[in-house]
Image (cartoon, rainbow, N blue to C red):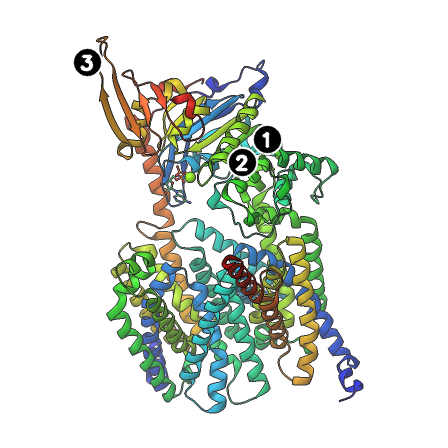
Amino acid sequence: MSHGSTKLNKNDISSEIDLHVNEVTVAYNNGHVALFDTTFDLGAGTICALVGVNGSGKSTLFKTIMGFLTPTRGSVTIGGKPVQVAQKQNMVAYIPQAEDVDWAFPVSVMDVVLMGRYGYMNFLRIPRATDLEIAIESLRRVNMLDYKERQIGELSGGQKKRVFLARALAQRGRIVLLDEPFSGVDVQTEAAIIELLRELRADEHLILVSTHDLGLVPSFCDQVVIINRTVLAAGPTHDTFTQENLARAFGGTLRDLRIDHTDAPDGTSNEFRVLSDDEEPLIFGHDGRLVDHWHPGIDEEESK
Amino acid sequence: MIELLLTPLHYEYMIKAIVVSGVIGGVCGLLSCFVTLKGWSLMGDALSHAIVPGVAVAYLVGLPFALGAFASGLLAAVVMGVVKSKTRIREDAVIGIVFTTFFAAGVLMISLFPSNISLKTIVLGNILGIADSDIIQMLAISAVALLVLVLKWKDLLLFAFDPNQAQSIGLNTTRLNLMLLILLAATAVAALQAVGAVLVIAMLVTPGATAYQLTDRFGRMMLLACGMGIVTSMLGAYISYFLNGSTGGCIVCLQTLVFLMAFFFAPKYGIVAARRKARRTTDALLISGDAHPVPALRGL
Amino acid sequence: MNLSYLIEPFQYRFMVEAMLMAALVGGTCAVLSCYLVLKGWSLMGDAVSHAVLPGIVLAYIVGAPLAVGAFLAGLLCASGTGWITNHSRLKGDAVMGVVFTGLFALGLVMFTKVTTDVHLNHILFGSLLGIERSDMLQAVIAATLTLVILAVVRKDILLYLFDANQARAVGLNTTFLHYLFLALLSLTIVAALQAVGIILTVAMLIVPGCIGLLLSDRFGRMTAIASGAAIFSAIAGTYLSYFLNGETGACIVLTQAIILTLAALFGPKYGILFRARAARRAAAGREQ
Ligand SMILES: Nc1ncnc2c1ncn2[C@@H]1O[C@H](COP(=O)(O)OP(=O)(O)O)[C@@H](O)[C@H]1O
Ligand SMILES: [Mg+2]
C-alpha cells in the first residue's frame, strides 16, 4: 500500500488529529515481533475500541502511538505529522494501565493533574493561574475536587482512574488513549468514564480504548479495531464486532453457545449464537451480527 | 616461554590460591543462578558488605573470622526483614540502608581499635597471602554450601521461580528463603578473602547471568555457571601472578569478558541472534497470507 | 567537661572546612537520593560510585582532572547497564551487578599496573580531614553544578521518574532527561568520593531519601527534609569523629542511620509507633 492512500483531505477540519497507523511492525529487543503490518485510520469524533486477547499487542500499539517504541517498519502519523511533533503540541493524552503506576510516589492528586499542564508551562514548570484553573476545572469534571490534596495512593481504584482522566483533560489533548481503563474499577466509575468519553467525542476528540472486556464495547464505541499481532478486522462496531471476527480473535477463550429456534411459529430461520466470556454474554443473530448484549449497570433496561 | 608460564606453579602459595579460588568460584557460580533469577543481586552485594563489622569484631576478640562474619551477615538479613515489613520504604532501599550502615559501623570499629586487620584487605581481598587456618574455614564453608545446594537445588529452584506454588505443594517457603539467605551469607564470607567485599557480588551474579544468556534449562545453567566460576577463578588467580596483584580484579575481569561474549554471541538470546530473529520473523509473517491486512479496514 | 572543650573542633580550620565540605556533599547527595529511593534505583548509586575507579586511573595516566575521568566512567556504567538490560533477557539488577563490578575490577587491575600518587585508600574511604585545595574546588564545582541544574529540571525529572509515558506525552525529551539524571548522579558521586569515599557515598545516596520518605508524602517537603537531615548529619558526624577519633565518613553515615531509625519509630504518619497506636485505636473502636 502506498503512502498516497493515507493522504488527508485538507478541507476536513478534523484532519489535524487524524490518526494513521500505517503498516507498522514492532519488534522488541529480544527479537519478539509483537505487531506486524498493522494498518488502520481513525478520525475525530470517534470512540474506538481496541480489542484483543492478553498479549495480542494492545499495549504495544499504544506505546508505538505514543512514540515510546519505534516501529521497525511502517509509520504512525497524527494529522500527517510524526508522533514526536504531535506530542510537542500536546495532542496526545494518555491514561496508563493501573499496574504501570507507582502508587507510593509522594505526589498529590493536584500534582498529578498539573503534570498534564507541563507542556504549556515555562521551563521551570511553575504553574500559572490558568494552569491551576484548568487543573481544578478538570478535577471538578471527574468529581474529584474534594480529594485534591490526597496522596495518590490513598484513593480507591475508581478514584485513581478519575485522577488520570482529569490529567488527560487538563492536558487538552485531542487524542486520548486509555489502556484497559475498566479493569479494577467500580460500576459507577465505569459509567462516569463512559459518560465523559461521550462528551469528549461530542467535542470532536478521538478516543482509543483498549480492553478485553467485550460486553462494554457495543454500548459506547462506534469503531472497533480487533487485533492479534496484526489487525484482524477494523471498522464501525456494527460491521466489525461480529461473531466471526470475535471468534477469530479470541478463539477458544470464549464460550460459544448455539440456540436454535427454527421451529418457531413463523417458520423463519431463527438461529442465535451466544458468545460469552462468562461475564457479559453477546448474542448474535444468524447473520453473525450483534443483536443483543448485556452489561451489568450500564444499560440494563436497554438490553432487556 | 613454557618455563615462564609454569613459574606460578612452582610456588606453594600460588597453587593454594588457584585451588581455593576455583573451589569458591564453583560454589559461587552455583549460587549465582538463584541470585540472578530471583533478582537478589543487591542482596548479594549487601551481605558481602554487611559482614565487615563481624570480621572486625571476630579479629578483635580472637574468634574465627568466619563465625563473626557469618553472624553479622545474618543479623543484617534479619534487620532488613524487620525494616521492610515495618516501614513503607522500598525493598531495594531497605537493603541499601542496612548494608551501608553495617559497613560504616565496621569501618568505624576498625578505625577506633587499630589492629592487624586492614580495611583494604577486607574490601579488596588478598588470597595470595591467605593463612592456612582461613583456607580451612573457607573450604569447610564451601563444602557445606555445596552439599546443601546439591541436595536441595530442586526445592530452591521452585522457590525462586514461583514461591506461591512452592508453598501450595507444602514446602516451607520461610525456611527455603532463610536457607538461601544463609547460603548467600556463607558464600559471601568465603569469597570475601578471595576477591574482597566489593567484588563478591560479581562472583555471585556474573556466572549466573552469563549462563542464563546461554540456556533455558536450569540444570544446564547450573553446570555452565559452576564451570565458568571454576575456570575463571583459577585462571584469574594464575594470571594475577604475572600482573603482580589484585587477584579479585583479574578474576572478575575475566568473568565480565565471558559475560560480554555471551551477551553478544549467545546462539539464541545473544544480541546478534535477536536481531536476526526479528528480521526473519517479520519476513516470514509478511510472506505468509495472514499477514496482509483485512481489505475492509481502509478509510474508516 | 566545659564549653571550651566542646567548641574545640571549631577552632581548627581543617575541621570547619571538613564540616562545610561534608555538608555540601551530603546535601547534594540527599537531593539525588530522593529520586533514587523513589525509583527503586538504590543499586544505581552503588554501581556508579564503584564504576568510577577505572576512569580515575585513566585520567591519572593521561593527566586529566580525576573528576572528569570519574564522571565519564560513571556515565559509561549507567548507560551501558541500560543498554545491556534493554537487549538481554536479564533483570536490570543482575546486569548492573555485572557491569559495575566489571568496571571496578578493571580499575583495580589497571591500578596495580600504574604507579600513582593517588591512594587507593583515599578513593575507597575518602579523606575528609586531609582534603586538598584542588580536590575541594572540584567538589564544590561539581556539587554546585548539580544543584543548579537540578533546581531547573527537578519537575521534569520527577515527572519522568513517576510516569515516563506522560513525560513524553507532554513533549519532554525523556532520553535527554534520563542521561541528564545519570550525568548529575555521576557528578555528585565525583564530588562525594573525595570526601567520604566510594562505599560511604552509597549510603549518602540512599539514607537521606528514606528519611524524607518516612516523614512526608510530598516531594518538595521530602527533599527539604532529606537535605536538612544530611547537612545536620554531616556536621554532627564530623564533630563527633573529632572526639571519637574515628573515620569521619563512617560517623556521618551512622548519624544518618540514627536519624532514620528515629524517623521510622516516631514519624508522625508512617512511624511504627504511630501506626501501632492507630491500629490499637481502630481495634478499640471496633469493639465498642
Ligand atoms: N518489553 C518487552 N520485551 C519483549 N516482549 C514483550 C515486551 N512487552 C511485551 N512483550 C510481548 O509482546 C506481546 C504483546 O504484549 P502487549 O502489547 O503488552 O499485549 P496486551 O497489552 O495486548 O496484553 C506479548 O507477547 C508480550 O509477551
Ligand atoms: Mg496491556
Instruction: Decide if residue A289 is on the left or right side of residue C6.
Output: left
Q: Amino acid at mark 2?
A: Tyr
Q: Quadrant of ligand 2?
A: top left
Q: Earlier in the sequence, mark 1 or mark 3?
A: 1
What chain does badge 2 belong to?
Answer: A
Frontmost residue, C62 versus C131: C131
**Looking at the image, residue B53 lies above or below residue C54:** below
Q: Which residue is mark 3?
A: A263
Which residue is farthest top? Answer: A266
Question: Where C235 falls versus A102 (above or below)?
Answer: below
Q: Tell if the residue under mark 1 belongs to the same chain as the one under mark 3.
A: yes
Pointer 1 chain? A
The mark that comes first in sequence, 1 or 2, is 2
Report which residue position mark 2 lands on.
A94
The kind of residue on which mark 1 rests is Gly
Q: Tag 2's secondary structure? A: strand
Q: Quadrant of residue B111?
A: bottom right
Please say if the residues under marks 1 and 3 sit with CB atoms less than 8 Å apart: no
Q: Quadrant of residue B181?
A: bottom left
Q: Nearer the viewer, residue A176 or C154?
A: A176
Q: Chain of mark 3?
A: A
Q: Are marks 1 and 2 on the same chain?
A: yes
Pointers 2 and 3 within a single chain: yes
Q: CA distance from mark 2 to mark 3?
A: 51 Å
Front position in the image: A45 or A160: A160
> Disc 1 vs disc 2: Cβ atoms closer than 8 Å?
yes
Q: Rounded to the nearest whole Å, what is the CA distance between mark 1 and mark 3?
A: 54 Å
The residue where tag 1 is placed is A173
Residue C7, position as x, y percentages in the image:
78, 82
- Which mark is on residue A186? none
Q: Position of residue B171 (x, y in %)?
A: 28, 64
Instruction: For residue C164, say whether it is visible.
Output: yes
